[in-house]
Amino acid sequence: MKTITLSTTLSPHENVHALLKGNTDAPKKALILFHGRGASADNIIGIADDVSLPDDVVVIAPHATGNEWYPFRFIAE
């Protein structure tokens, strides 16, 4: 498994880390797995071990800042 850093200035998720599994050298396809609120990239990347993927696929699991992609509540108080 490899780790990379994704950089952006238009998001609260600047310099976010992502885990990579599978064909990280010359992939032709990508499967991107986003974790849920309170979880992490480490939690979701394990799905790649549970499914059969072609040899030309890289699995990418970015990790959200603060373990949440959207920092606001979905339910009004």
Image (spheres, helix red, strand yellow):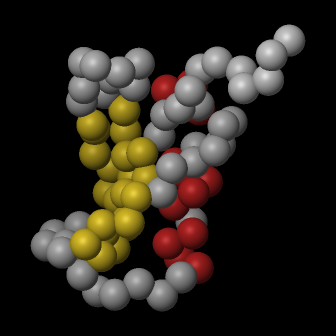
Residue drawn at (24%, 30%) of the image: 7
- Which residue is nearer to you in this view: 3 or 54? 54
Is 29 positioned to the left or the right of 68 in the image? Answer: left
Percent x, y of residue 10: 28, 19
**Front-most of 75 and 23?**
75
In the image as oriented, which residue stretches furthest toward the right?
A: 77
Is 57 above or below relative to 44? below
Quadrant containing the C terminus is: top right
Q: Position of residue 70 (x, y in %)?
A: 56, 27
Q: Give the residue furthest to the top.
A: 77
Toward which corner of the image does residue 29 lie, by quadrant?
Answer: bottom left
Residue 4 relative to residue 64: left or right: left
> Residue 61: x percent and y percent?
43, 53
Q: Quadrant of residue 67?
A: top right
Q: Is residue 11 above or below residue 38?
A: above
> Where's the N terminus, which quadrant?
bottom left
- Give the residue at the far left of this rendering: 26
Q: Quadrant of residue 22?
A: bottom left
Residue placed at 57% from the left, 57% from the top? 44
